[in-house]
Amino acid sequence: MKILLTTLNSKYVHSNLALKYLYTVVAGENSHVEVREFTINNDPGYIFSELVRANCDMVCFSCYIWNIEQIKILAGDVKKARPDLKILVGGPEVSFNGIDFIRDNSWVDYIICGEGEYSFYRLCQVLESRDRRFDTVPGLIYRQDGRIFVNGLTDNMDFNLIPFPYSLLDCEDDRVVYYESSRGCPFRCSYCLSSAETSVRFLDVDRVKRELRYFLYKKPKQVKFIDRTFNSRPERAYEIFKYLIDNDNGVTNFHFEICADLLDDRTLCLLSMARKGLFQMEIGIQSANPATLTAIGRRDNIYPVLYNTERLIKLGNIHTHVDLIAGLPYESYGIFARSFDKVYDLKADMLQLGFLKVLCGTPIYNQIEAHNIKYRKHAPYEVISTAYISAEELVRLKMIENMVDVYYNRGGFGSTLDFLIKASDMGAFGFYEKLADFYYEKGFQNRERKKEDQYRILLEFAGDLERSSREDLKKKTQELLEQDMRANTNPEIFNRFMKKGWKLT
């Protein structure tokens, strides 16, 4: 039986860890299994042709919010071209509404719900057998004789029994390498699918070190841990951090999602000794409003999180990424603005302003009436409005998100932004709000802008601010923009820009 494991990643540099696990558990017994990854940006006709041309007996799709709508169209077309082909789907986007999904999509033959390694292994055994006992495959939803059958889930297996996903497949040099040392999350954030997990399972630290040794040898640019809260056991996290510091290959960056209030003095002291660029930390702050934090199942005392995040940032050698989520319960536009200002003041390397996704299987999905949450019907199921924030206000936050991404996250404007925020005397949120209004009123969002254009736009905005200020903002802004640009571009680009001038064309 020839099997193709496939998905559509959001970008080429991303890779799919789930497919690697599935390949590893069956490749030893089935030599006719292949992994093929595409992206949501590939031409649909190209992907369709490649899947039909593969001439497989079964195609298996790994489904997420960023690819499910395209997969539904693609898989339906493939089924029309090859009616005899079996199609299996799995992943978080189909695990919590599998019965509805198979009813609504006639092209689906099998759905694996929940953790997939053993279920997929067992399904492959059944498909190769004569008796076809599909009822022995845990977590399987399937069609048989015109009827739909649903198998119950079993307890998750010992994580240490699941093979290393790179034992048979190499890690690609030109992609982010994904890795997990634990599954599950000790926290129950109401918007997160990890809240459905009943336990946290950890790989033995000695095994983690052996597998990290492989990455240190291969020297990929980045290894991204997908552990939901990597430092949920601080001592374990400390041991792994220390191993990576002691065995640093000078090339690879390791990314972790952590809980800042679990950082202690000992760990921060250790992290201060890491090579700059060795570690990247992502901290989901999400909100600074106590009522909101309580409503989503997080600790309502935000100050330990802010304090430790600031300490981590001040080390100066750890790239730090912080997150906020708009559209959460009890957070109005004004309250979100206060959360934004508190988090912006931390001066993280990146501030991601995200928007609530109402995912089937999460507690907040069952609270949409209580909070009058309206959200988009199709993936990624993003919030439209709530009882606390209007659709128009969320659209304004989208505009502000764009400005934060262009001017803060992409870098190159640091000194100028600090000066303008202070000079405007309206706080960080007020500044980006005013910048967004200016940017969109001028129509600058209507086409892709070069980086040098963004320098010119910010200078023009300073001139607009100057009319309501007593300071000579535009002259000082131009001086600082020149300094920022000189520091963040190569001399050839800077000289070409200065020769062309500051007029925006």
Image (tube, helix red, strand yellow):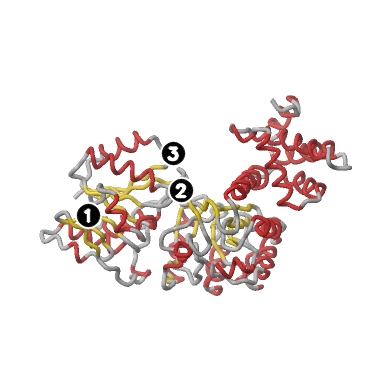
Where residue 281 sits, quadrant-wise, is bottom right
Mark 1 or 2: the one toward you: 2
Is the residue marked by circle 1 packed among few (<14), some (14-19), or many (20+) residues within 10 Å?
Answer: some
Image spot of residue 392 (x, y percent): 60, 47
> Which mark sits nearer the N-terminus, 1 or 3?
1
Measured in 3D between alpha carbons, the distance from the residue under mark 1 to the one under mark 3, in whole angstroms, is 31 Å
Q: CA distance from mark 1 to mark 2?
A: 26 Å
Q: To which residue does mark 3 refer?
A: 41
The x and y percentages for residue 316 are 69, 58
Q: Are marks 3 and 2 in contact (CB under 8 Å)?
A: no
Label disc, if present, on residue 14 of the rendered structure: 2
- Left or right of 273? Residue 431 is right
Q: Is residue 143 left or right of residue 159?
A: left
Callout 3 amino acid: Asn
Give the percent coordinates (x, y) of residue 344. Answer: 69, 56
Comparing labels 3 and 2, the label whose residue is closer to the camera: 3
Q: Secondary structure at mark 2?
A: loop
- The amino acid type of the residue labelled 2 equals His
Circle nearer the viewer, 1 or 3: 3
Quadrant of the frame with the C terminus:
top right
Q: Is residue 150 left or right of residue 255?
A: left
Say whether disc 3 or disc 2 marks the residue closer to the N-terminus: 2
Q: Under tag 1, what secondary structure?
A: loop
**Which residue is denoted by mark 1 in the rendering?**
30
- Vertical comparison of 293 with 53: above or below: below
In three-dimensional space, the C-alpha distance between marks 3 and 2, rounded to whole angstroms, equals: 12 Å
Disc 1 marks a residue whose amino acid type is Asn
Considering every residue shown, the one lying at the far right of the view is 470
Sequence-wise, the earlier of marks 1 and 2 is 2
